[in-house]
Structures are given as structure tokens and as C-alpha cells.
Amino acid sequence: MTSAAFIEIRNLSKAYGSFRALNDVGLDVGRGEFLSILGPSGSGKTTLLMALAGFVRPDRGQISVDGRDLVRLPANKRGIGVVFQNYALFPHMNVAANVMFPLRVRGIGRAEAAERARKALDIVDLANMAERDIATLSGGQKQRVALARAVVFEPRLMLMDEPLSALDKNLREQMQYEIRKLHDRLGLTTVYVTHDQREALTMSDRIAVMRDGVIRQLGTPASLYHRPTSRFVAEFLGEANILELDAVESFVAPERDATGAGRKLMIRAERLSLSDASGHDHVSLSGTLTRSVFQGDSWLISVDLANGGAVSARIAAAEAANFNLEALAEGAPLKLHVRRDALIPVIDA
């Protein structure tokens, strides 16, 4: 990824009646960057992607790609590759014909289109399936065909709208790796819409978290996960405990204002431990066990704190075995420990 702004979006707004799907959105995407747009249903992420693709006309605002204004340019003139959630393949065409289609509508001759389609299918490891009917393919194979069709005309920009949501867990994780590898191999700029937090964390250079038509936070996966600025982002990205500032004894929030108004503490569930680590860089939380659930490589436990509030902790299986966690009954006293730097002030919004 380079620092150049390849995509520039300014003051983008779109309303459907009284519903504001996009509310004055601004965003820069670097050339060669893999940016994910993450958010719950109705957050505006797909509207933003479709406005970039040219399938939605914004009410106001600017969109430019590589210095070129796109707002009034038809979708078929933008030269953007798009992969949809439902693949959008033509069932009456075989694999090769589906991949050739974008070239044929651009006036490319059949022989050249066939050769370029063969190369695109080779990139996604489907060169031996060129003559197969679409109906005979698995979900993962259909997704690869959709990817080949999207890159066959060598676009500089790829847009993807939840392309893996219909796949099972194992295949989805495999395709995450394949899409990111394709992005890197072809030097694409990719904007990827998803509601899956782990998918966004796995694939992205940066993530834009959206809610109510607004980008709530933009940053690298690590910065958003470890340093969320709001309760919404903290809870949307992983397992987060939100506590009052005074629920953790002797902790002073470095960013707390004079009153502490509107601010709370976030602790990731996996940062809590049963192991006692004495010293000024750790704090302890005392309480009673209210629930424990075995989940294979870890236990998820819930603890009511003695000084108010409750937390969930994810305890690695090896640590749980050392403390014989399985034998503890509900109501048993329990002490959890956490590094002081794992207590992150967030705005309660």
C-alpha cells in the first residue's frame, strides 16, 4: 500500500425518504490498499459501495478515483470490477463464457477474450473447468468464477459486497486467504463490504466501521481492536467488557477529563486472566463465577464483580486446566487479573 489517495470521497449523502443511508461521509483510500467497510445491517456500508460502483446516485457529495470525477459517470464507464454477494453469474453460460462476458461487451474479439478468460481462470485455479456449466459448481467454485470475471478486464479497483457470506466457515476462511492473495498479486485497490468482524480483521489494511450512515472509526485492524474510541466500536469488534471508571480500584484513566462524564473502561475478554501477576502494572477484579462454557480451545466465563458490574473472560484451555476451572461451581469466589494498559477508556456511545 502506498500513501497516495487513489479514492477520494467527500461529503457523500444519500437518503431514501426520511431514512439517511449516508450522512456526509468522507473517506480516502490509498492506491493498492485493501479497505473493508464494516458495520451492522442498515449502517450504510452497501449504499457507500454501490455509490462508488455507480449503481446508486448520491444526493450530494463527490467521488473521484485517481483524480477522475465519477459521480455522473455511468457504472459501465467506470472500469471497476464488482463481485456481488450472490455471484450474479449467468446460468445459461458455461464458466468460460461467464468470464469472457465483460470483454465481449467491451468489443474484444472472441479469440482474445477467450485467451484472457483462460488466464483469469488460471489465476483462480479454475483453468480446467472452463467448459463446466455453472449449475455443476460448488459455492466456492462459483465465487472463484465471479472473481475471474471481475478481474478479466484488468480493473484498477475491485469492489466486493459480502462475497463470502453464503459459504460455510472453513470455505469462507480459505476464500479470505485467496481473495487477499489475488489482491496482492494483481496490485489491486480493493474496497470490501462485510458484517463479519473476524473477516475484516483478517483481510484488511484498514477498516472503516460504519453506523447510521456515518464512519464511526477508521484505522488498522490492530488499532481499532485494541484502541476503539467508542463503546459501539469496542463491542462490535470482538468480546468487550464495558465498566464504569470506578469499577476498577485505583485505576486512573489517562484520557479522563475532569468529570469523567460519558467515559467508561473497555477490557477485552481474552486479556483477563486467572493467573496472579503482582505489581503496579496489574489490577485485580474480585467477584463470583456465574457461568462457565467450554468452547474447545478456551472457556468463556462470566463473573459478577464485588464492586459492581460484570465481566466475561476468555480463559485458554491450558490455563483453565491449571486452575481446575471445570470443577468450579456457580457462585464460587474468583479473582481475575489484567494488565493496567489493557484498560482502555472509551466514550459511552
Image (cartoon, rainbow, N blue to C red):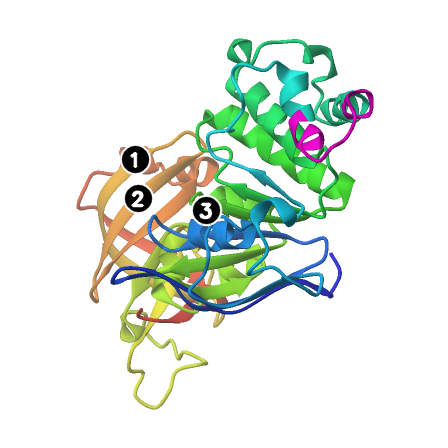
Q: Residues within 10 Å of mark 1 (few under 14, many from 20)?
A: few
Q: Position of residue 256 (x, y in %)?
A: 39, 82
Q: Position of residue 236 (x, y in %)?
A: 38, 53
Q: Of the residues under marks 1 and 2, which one precedes in the sequence? A: 1
Can the viewer see residue 216 in this picture? yes
- Do the numbered discs 2 and 3 sit on residues whose CB atoms are within 8 Å? no
Kindly identify which numbered label has been placed on residue 301: 2
Q: Amino acid at mark 3?
A: Gln
Image depth: mark 3 or mark 1 in front = 3
Give the quarter of the figure containing the C terminus.
bottom left
Asked which quadrant contains residue 231, the reply is bottom left
Looking at the image, residue 105 sits to the left or right of residue 248; the answer is right
CA separation, marks 3 and 1?
22 Å
Q: Residue at x 70, y 37 (%)?
A: 181
Magenta residues span: 101-113
Q: Residues within 10 Å of mark 2 (few under 14, many from 20)?
A: some
User: What secondary structure prevails in the magenta region?
Assistant: helix
Magenta region includes residue 112: yes
Q: Residue at x 49, y 43 (%)?
A: 198
Q: Amino acid at mark 2?
A: Ile
Kindly identify which numbered label has been placed on residue 197: 3
